[in-house]
Image: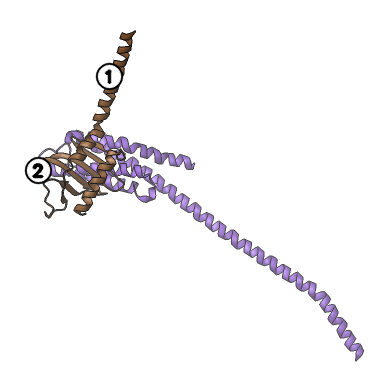
């Protein structure tokens, strides 16, 4: 796994999440994951290398973490889990919005409020 | 001399008259025998192919039944793990999870011919279980309660809910075959 591959994975995740092609699920607090046939990717807010931030983790078919990418990563660190430098905050925000349906909920509320408003005006006009 | 020649010529002609139909009859018989043996060979080949197909079908059915049994076992193990977590008996959980992952890997092997979506769901369960296993292992080393322990059973329950339809799908395959 290389930094270029991680960057490409991130860009594709962003793009496919935006288009709704990926089904993320909430794993725990501020922790979301999406699984493919032989791998899983998760995006989590937490403390990484001493700093509060967002981390993108990649798990293999055995469920073992293979790589993680976050802002303060040290790619040269000798470890079983490879580290890459990346700030996946945009992805976390997008995934949160998709999973918790913030936009969808506010749109639904606004739609219903607008309809109620129209009906109210019609009633008053009569 | 002429008489002898005439007799010989006549007997030769007679032999030809009798011999030609006899030869033709024998050729016909040989042809029939060859056709019969060819038909027999074809029938035997077809029977052998049919047997092969039947054996393969039987093998697939056995594999399907074995996968159903495995998935039932996996779901039951998940319930066991939940019971251990509920009572904070974390000791046996990592081993149970390891066995569970082995079973799930068997179920999602290519021979099961599961849909890609089902394979991804099993992968999600494997990844989630491994994370729980890691947390419990880490906590046993640090003697601190596992991080996110309150979520463990909720996570496992969610994966049980997701795996259950796969079991139903496999069971339906048996009914379809019947």
Q: Which of marks 1 and 2 is in front?
A: 1
List x then y, in percent, for residue B132. 20, 41
- In the rendered structure, find residue A113 and report the number of the disc placed on it: 1
Q: Mark 2 points at which residue?
A: B142
Residue A3 vs B69, above or below: the answer is: below
List x then y, in percent, for residue B35. 66, 64
Locate residue A29: give its quadrant: top left
How dense is the environment of label 2, judged by Cα within 10 Å: few (below 14), some, or many (20 and up)? few
How dense is the environment of label 1, judged by Cα within 10 Å: few (below 14), some, or many (20 and up)? few
Check the residue under mark 1 and report the chain it is in.
Answer: A
Horizontal side of B130 relative to B41 (left or right) equals: left
Residue located at (31% from left, 40% from top): A21
Residue lying farthest to the left in this orientation: A50
List x then y, in percent, for residue A79. 13, 53
Residue located at (38% from left, 48% from top): B112
Q: How many marks?
A: 2
Can residue B5 be seen here? The reply is: yes
Estimate the spatial distance between the alpha carbons at disc 1 and disc 2, rounded to whole Å. 53 Å
Q: Which chain is brown?
A: A
- Callouts 1 and 2 on one subunit: no
Rendering colour (chain B): purple
Q: What element carries label 2?
A: helix
Circles 1 and 2: CB distance less than 8 Å? no
Check the residue under mark 2 and report the chain it is in.
Answer: B
């Amino acid at each position: 796994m290389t930094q270029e591959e991680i960057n490409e994975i991130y860009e594709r995740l962003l793009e496919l999440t935006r288009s709704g092609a990926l089904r993320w699920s909430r794993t725990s607090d501020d922790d979301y994951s999406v699984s493919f046939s032989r791998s899983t990717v998760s995006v989590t807010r937490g403390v990484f290398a001493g700093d509060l931030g967002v981390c993108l983790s990649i798990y293999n078919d055995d469920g073992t973490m293979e790589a993680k990418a976050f802002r303060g990563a040290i790619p040269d660190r000798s470890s079983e889990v490879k580290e890459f430098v990346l700030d996946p905050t945009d992805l976390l925000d997008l995934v949160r919005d998709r999973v918790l349906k913030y936009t969808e909920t506010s749109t639904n509320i606004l739609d219903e409020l607008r309809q109620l408003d129209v009906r109210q005006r019609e009633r008053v006009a009569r | 001399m002429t008489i002898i020649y005439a007799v010989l010529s006549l007997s030769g002609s007679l032999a030809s008259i009798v011999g030609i139909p006899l030869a033709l009859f024998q050729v016909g018989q040989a042809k029939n025998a060859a056709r019969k043996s060819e038909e027999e060979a074809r029938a035997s080949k077809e029977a052998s192919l049919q047997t092969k197909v039947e054996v393969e079908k039987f093998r697939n059915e056995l594999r399907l039944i074995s996968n159903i049994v495995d998935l039932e076992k996996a779901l039951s193990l998940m319930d066991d793990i939940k019971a251990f977590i509920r009572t904070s008996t974390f000791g046996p959980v990592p081993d149970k999870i390891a066995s569970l992952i082995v079973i799930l890997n068997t179920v999602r092997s290519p021979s099961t011919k599961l849909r890609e979506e089902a394979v991804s769901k099993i992968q999600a369960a494997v990844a989630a279980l491994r994370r729980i296993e890691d947390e419990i292992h880490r906590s046993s080393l640090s003697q601190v309660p596992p991080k996110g322990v309150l979520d463990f059973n909720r996570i496992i329950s969610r994966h049980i809910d997701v795996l259950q339809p796969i079991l139903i799908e496999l069971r339906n395959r048996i009914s379809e075959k019947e």
